[in-house]
Amino acid sequence: MRRGDRVTIICIQRPGKLAPFAERLGADVVCLNKPRGRSPKAIDDAKRVLQKMQPDVLHTHQIGALWYLGQAAKRLGLQAVVHTEHSDHVRQAKTWRAKLRARYLWWQGGRLAARMCCVSDDVAAAVRRWETVPTNKVAVVANGIDTDVYGDRSQRDELRQRLAIPANAFVIGTVGRLAEVKRQDLLLKAFAELAPAFPELRLLLVGDGPEQARLEALANSLDLADRTIFAGYQAQPEQFLAVMDLFALTSRHEALPLALLEAWASGLPVVASSVGGIPKVVESGRTGILFPSGDCQALVNSLRMLLLDAQLRQNVATAGQAEVHAKFSLQRMADDYEVQYAAASSQSLIQSSCGRHLC
């Protein structure tokens, strides 16, 4: 919208928590209200919405959105369809049937989208494998964030007081959905091992999700309930990043997580599992500390190393912050997508970006 585009956001099932925020920024939000399960009617509904909106470019996120909106666009003759793939769904799938289904959806998606943009090299390699998606359609467009939003610590003391965190506490934190793939249980177990030697240590979990009750029970069983804070979902995570002194990302699967970039932008030293696209982004020992996925003792060692070495924490935090400003800004991501929109559009639609309608 800052570039003069008109933006409409189409929600497949229901408006998400960010819908009001998008509307405040000037976007129109439309919902198809698709019920659970496959719904041919949703394609017809999507067609009617697109017919009314007359977008110049359709940009989908997640394969389900491409499945419905891409088919609707095809029926209308809209060829400028750009898709962003955020995860390696084949690797995430736990059964061969699920893996085949994920690859089939990619195969279908590759025929519905003019451009398949992947947030990391490992996701791009996965969608190209076995020529599932034609190579000439695949590009890597790394995530970007508005770095200006992060790094303000003016509300740190006030938030700590609200969360009942002592002023002198050292806070290890994470931001993310409380889901099995994020492995916050591993972080709790590592915290339990470190806690006796570091009485000032606290753990802050920002997010909600299906694992919350299990994680709270685990914190209780580890006798950490009074030192672990479950802050729930927060629309402005940057405020809670300011409360933290160290950021930990323990997922068993990631592509290029925004949470990592946001922690860097906030000036935090980062410990992260070496999965997906993370090793291509984090230089272990310089911009962060990487540990093997699922290895609790390696996580403990990584956290302890940073807890004991203030200079290393500062060096890692400074290098990470420089990295996100240099390579992962919102401006850079927007520029990259302009190129993809141009590649997906006919020449008559891309003479000027001003006034273009994006869905």
Image (tube, grey):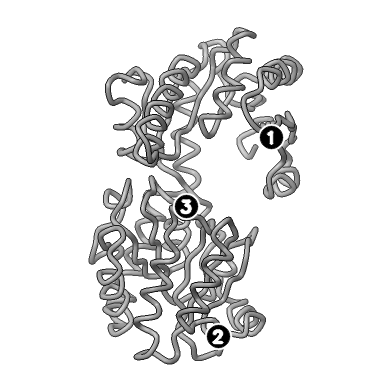
Distance, label 1 to label 3, CA atoms, is 23 Å
Are the two marked residues, 3 and 2, in contact with CB atoms closer than 8 angstroms?
A: no
Q: Position of residue 251 (x, y in %)?
A: 39, 56
Within 10 angstroms of label 2, few (less than 14), some, or many (20 or more) residues? few
Measure how far apart labels 2 and 1 are at the Cα level: 38 Å
332 left or right of 209?
left
Disc 3 marks which amino acid? Leu
Image depth: mark 1 or mark 3 in front? 1
Apparent side of residue 243 relative to residue 264 in the rendered image (left or right)? right
Amino acid at circle 2:
Asp
Q: Sequence order check: which comes first, mark 3 or mark 2?
A: 2
Q: Pick the quarter of the image with the C terminus.
A: top right
Query: Label 1: few (<14), some or many (≥20) within 10 Å?
Result: some
Counting residues from the start of the chain, the first of labels 1 and 3 encountered is 1
Foreground of the two, 22 or 326: 22
Q: Is residue 43 above or below residue 258?
A: above
The correct choice, above or below, for 87 with respect to 70 in the image is below
Helix, strand or loop at disc 1?
loop
Circle 3 packing at 10 Å, graded few (<14), some (14-19), many (20+), is some
Q: Give 71 or 325, whichever is nearer the viewer.
A: 71
Of residues 346 and 209, the one nearer the viewer is 209
**Residue that carries the numbered disc 1 in the rendered image:** 13
Sequence-wise, the earlier of marks 2 and 1 is 1
Q: Using the image, tell me which numbered label, if any, was put on residue 258.
A: 3
Q: Quadrant of residue 39?
A: top right
Q: Is residue 43 above or below residue 185?
A: above
Q: Quadrant of residue 35?
A: top right
Q: CA distance from mark 3 to mark 2?
A: 29 Å
* Amino acid residing under circle 1: Gln
Say which residue label 2 marks: 226
